[in-house]
Amino acid sequence: MVQTSRRLLLGSALGLAVSPALAQNRMGYGASPTLASPDLEHQVQNFSRQVGWPAGAMPTAPAGFTVTPFAAHGLDSPRWLYLLPTGDVLVSEARTTAKPPETEEDKKKLELQRQSGTVAGGSANRITLLRDADGDGIAEHRQVLLQGLDQPFGMAWRDGWLYVGNTDGVLRFPFDPERRRIDASAPQRLMDLPAGGYNNHWTRNLAFGPDGRKLFVTVGSASNVGEYGMEVEARRAAILEADPDGANQRIFAYGLRNPNGIDWHPETGALWTAVNERDNIGDDLVPDYITSVRDGGFYGWPYSYWGNHPDPRMARERPDLVRAALTPDYAVGNHTASLGLVFGRGTALPERYRGGAFIGQRGSWNRAEFSGYRVAFVPFRQGRPSGPIEDFLTGFMPDPSSGETYGRPVCVIQDAAGALLVTDDTGNRIWRVAAG
């Protein structure tokens, strides 16, 4: 049974009078992060509480940027976004659904998760099209394209087909973006995927490679650290690859505990992903990360972390894989729930942001001091991280001492004009961040 530790109470009392950005200590950041020692007694449960955005309140961006609501009505847990060739934006609306509690401790945890906006009794399970017809940065047209899906997340369009990443498989539907017409009556099921998963590991992102020849699909682990047996982790904690029709499926890379955001660097063409790392091994372990992804590469989970650092809970089972594990490229903080990833493109962004990584950090629950709850930015040069991580969009948790959040950022993309769009799943908003 998981119980709240005394360290949670002590840490909360000592460390929550600062912003989420300042509350993150220096451990767990950068290309060569300082790593704490494993703490197998760590059982912190520190859930935020969702209170909603006050009237007129918005996130805060750096000087020179303007934040406005792109869509603020009629959304139910907007998770992921996709830009169509027409400039219209698709949003998948889904959330983690609550399992019936079995114990009193389960009931308490479930209530805290509901207050934080992490779980709810139901999921919208739909994909909605948003259109800004007059170009004012606000989507005045809203059209539900698909309903009755199974926790949809990632989306992609190619050659007349809309691809959807349900939690249990990849579907595609005939879709004409110009006429905004879709045939929902007979979807093609291209791939079966293992469903469900630990906490939020139901998310299945998908994207085509730059040449459009291969479809890539992310699948998170079924467990925190393999505690249910590795047989249930088949084709999980991985990025899968397939042809557009679902043929020739294979594991592209594995040992990635919960990869979500994927993007190709605009200069090098390398595939990168944002990975949400493991829990219950310390406030300052294990850092979430962004990394370039090698074909056939193994990234440690669950046997090791940050390359060859053995996880004492699993390392003895596969010392060969501990030795083989690749070290990620850049740590972005411990327990930040880093999910979104997009590289800045085009002249609509100031030059220093072009080619850099924008990262949606939904925020911690397994840490005494809150971390994440922001969109972060990592500058790049010549296709590699070139400077320290920094705040880009903040204000989602204005006062960590209260534990209250106005919202939680997840996905980041650029719209047709080059501005950033950010989903706020618990605030039921999509924010637009434009330069100038």
Image (cartoon, grey):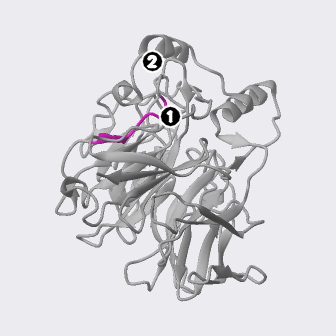
Q: Nearer the viewer, residue 287 or 167?
A: 167
Which label was assigned to residue 57?
1
Residue indicated by mark 2: 16
Residue range in magenta is: 389-397
Residue type (three-letter) at the residue carrying disc 1: Ala
Dot 1 alpha-carbon crowd within 10 angstroms: few under 14, some 14 to 19, many 20 or more: few
Is 248 on the left or on the right of 228, as rendered?
A: left
Q: Distance of mark 2 from mark 1, alpha carbons? A: 22 Å
Image spot of residue 106 (x, y percent): 76, 30
Please identify the quarter of the rendering in which residue 285 is found. Answer: top left
Which residue sits at x=27%, y=39%?
33
Can residue 335 be seen by looking at this rendering?
A: no
Q: Nearer the viewer, residue 176 or 6?
A: 176
Q: Quadrant of the N terminus?
A: top right
Is label 2 in a helix, a strand or a loop?
Answer: loop
Which residue sits at x=39%, y=25%?
19
Residue type (three-letter) at the residue carrying disc 2: Leu
Which residue sits at x=70%, y=63%?
126
Is 269 on the left or on the right of 159, as rendered?
A: left
